[in-house]
Image (cartoon, grey):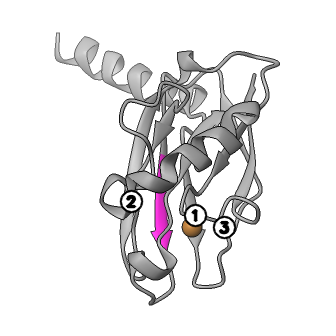
Amino acid sequence: MLRKLTLVALLGLGSSPLLAAECTVDVESTDQMTFNTQAIEVSKSCETFTVNLKHTGSLPKTAMGHNWVLSKTADMPGIATDGIPAGPDASYLKAGDERVIAHTDLIGGGESTSVTFDVNKLSAGEDYSFFCSFPGHYSMMKGSVKLVD
Ligand code: CU1
């Protein structure tokens, strides 16, 4: 009986590396209005995907705030423009904007935040982008997001 339980436990451990797709990514943002990554690939094998956003600078969020917003690439300019009047407390995103697939809060220097979203919100072959919706930032602070096998 004891031996059987041990065997089951070992098999359980042995199978876990097969499921170890990377379902998380660390993204850094700076006082120079940059992200340290330009492309993020999301594996279809992930149920959820987590983005950990860090602001490595020191400027406050009212001057150099950053967030991480995911949308279809075609929706990016509209989301950014419509988010400007929302202000920093609303992370420069219009309330209830359905074009936004996922987003973090707006953070300032030295701060970190994260967001987790359902991968089934992404379709293969669709063109997605991530960007910062702080006014004027998305022209530099953006990159591609792709659903991959
Ligand atoms: Cu930004």
Q: Residue 87 bears which disc, if any? A: 2
Q: Position of residue 11 (x, y in %)?
A: 43, 20
Q: CA distance from mark 2 to mark 3?
A: 21 Å
Q: Over which residues does the magenta segment extend?
A: 51-55
In the depicted view, which residue is nearer to us: 55 or 137? 137
Q: Which residue sits furthest bottom? A: 58
Q: Is residue 7 left or right of residue 26?
A: left
Q: Position of residue 31 (x, y in %)?
A: 58, 84
Quadrant location, ligand no. 1: bottom right
In the rendered picture of this protein, how many numbered marks are placed on residues? Answer: 3
Q: Is residue 127 magenta-colored?
A: no
Q: Residue 35 bears which disc, if any? A: 3
Kindly report which numbered mark, 3 or 1, lies closer to the viewer in this rendering: 1
Residue located at (66% from left, 29% from top): 43
Q: CA distance from mark 1 to mark 2?
A: 9 Å
Q: Judging from the image, what secondary structure is the residue with disc 2 in?
A: loop
Q: CA distance from mark 3 to mark 1?
A: 15 Å
Mark 2 and mark 3 lie on one chain; the one further toward the N terminus is 3
* Mark 3 crowd level (few <14, some 14–19, many ≥20, 10 Å Cα): many
Residue located at (42% from left, 30% from top): 13
Where residue 29 sits, quadrant-wise, is: bottom right
Q: Is residue 140 left or right of residue 11?
A: right
Q: Is residue 52 magenta-colored?
A: yes
Q: Is residue 104 above or below residue 13?
A: below
Where residue 113 sits, quadrant-wise, is: bottom left
Residue bearing mark 1: 135
Q: Is residue 12 above or below residue 53?
A: above
* Mark 1 crowd level (few <14, some 14–19, many ≥20, 10 Å Cα): some
Q: Position of residue 142 (x, y in %)?
A: 72, 55
Mark 1 and mark 2 lie on one chain; the one further toward the N terminus is 2
